[in-house]
Image (cartoon, grey):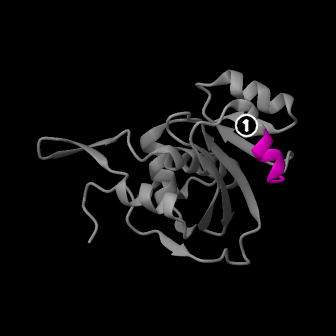
């Protein structure tokens, strides 16, 4: 049973990425004490598939870039990142990556994700965030603001999906909820 305060409820966790998913962008949420989350988000038709690439605390910018290089992160693929750390974005771009400022709008970004069928690689970090990502409650009232816990990968996913929705799904039909 999933609580009404959970933000997401219908994701499917899979052991392997279905072959139909070939196009992707990255989402990146920077952390230090909290994990830095880099996710690869694929899209096809009305579905997305999410893969964890990096989910690690205490990464310096140099550590992050070295890890991205060792993982062969494609330098030509867009990475949507949290613009509150422009110095990290500048260093990543200097290293040759295509890092762009994410649209960080929260409620509309969450709504964007909910317009897709969501499939996700079965891994413990994203699953833990999915299970614990909740709307803030004031008394018995559920607000439309997320609790700022268990949101590192969730924010990175939101950045990527907002870009996918804006760049590749330009019809406005999804606005009619």
Quadrant for the N terminus in the image: bottom left
Residue 148 is left or right of residue 124, and the answer is: left
Q: Does residue 1 sit above or below 100 in this rendering?
A: below
Image location (x, y in percent) of residue 166: 64, 46
In the rendered image of this protein, does residue 49 appear above or below residue 36?
A: below
- Residue 23 found in image quarter: bottom right
| Residue found at the very far top of the displayed protein | 87
- The quarter holding residue 173 reads bottom right
Res 20 visible: yes
Q: Is residue 73 visible?
A: no
Quadrant of image for the C terminus: bottom left
Specify the segment rendered in magenta: 66-73
Relative height, residue 16 to residue 93 (above, below): below
Question: Which residue is at the far left?
Answer: 139
The question of residue 3 being in magenta is answered with no
Q: Which residue is mark 1?
A: 63
Residue drawn at (65%, 77%) of the image: 16
Residue 163, image x, y percentages: 65, 46
Nearest the eye: 35 or 90:
35
**Residue 89 in the image, given as x and y percentages of width and height:** 72, 29
At x 78%, y 32%, the residue is 92
Q: Position of residue 62 (x, y in %)?
A: 75, 32
Left or right for 173, reference 72: left
User: Does the magenta portion include 68?
Assistant: yes
Q: Is residue 168 left or right of residue 37?
A: right
Q: Residues within 10 Å of mark 1 (few under 14, many from 20)?
A: few
- Image mark count: 1
Q: Quadrant of residue 67?
A: top right
The secondary structure that dominates the magenta segment is helix
The relative height of residue 22 versus residue 133 in the rendered view (above or below) is below
Q: Between residues 93 and 55, which one lies in front from this camera angle?
A: 55
């Amino acid at each position: 049973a999933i609580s009404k305060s959970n933000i997401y409820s219908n994701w499917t966790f899979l052991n392997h990425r279905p072959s139909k998913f070939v196009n992707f962008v990255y989402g990146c949420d920077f952390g230090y004490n909290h994990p830095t989350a880099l996710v690869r988000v694929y899209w096809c038709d009305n579905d997305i598939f999410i893969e964890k690439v990096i989910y690690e605390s205490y990464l310096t910018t140099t550590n992050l870039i070295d890890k991205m290089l060792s993982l062969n992160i494609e330098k030509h693929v867009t990475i949507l990142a949290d613009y509150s750390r422009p110095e990290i974005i500048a260093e990543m771009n200097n290293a040759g990556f295509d890092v762009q400022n994410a649209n960080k709008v929260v409620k509309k970004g969450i709504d964007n994700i909910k317009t897709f069928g969501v499939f996700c690689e079965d891994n413990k970090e994203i699953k833990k965030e999915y299970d614990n990502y909740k709307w803030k409650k004031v008394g018995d009232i559920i607000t439309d603001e997320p609790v700022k816990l268990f949101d590192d990968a969730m924010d990175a996913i939101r950045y990527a999906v907002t870009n996918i929705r804006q760049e590749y799904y330009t019809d406005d039909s999804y606005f009619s909820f």
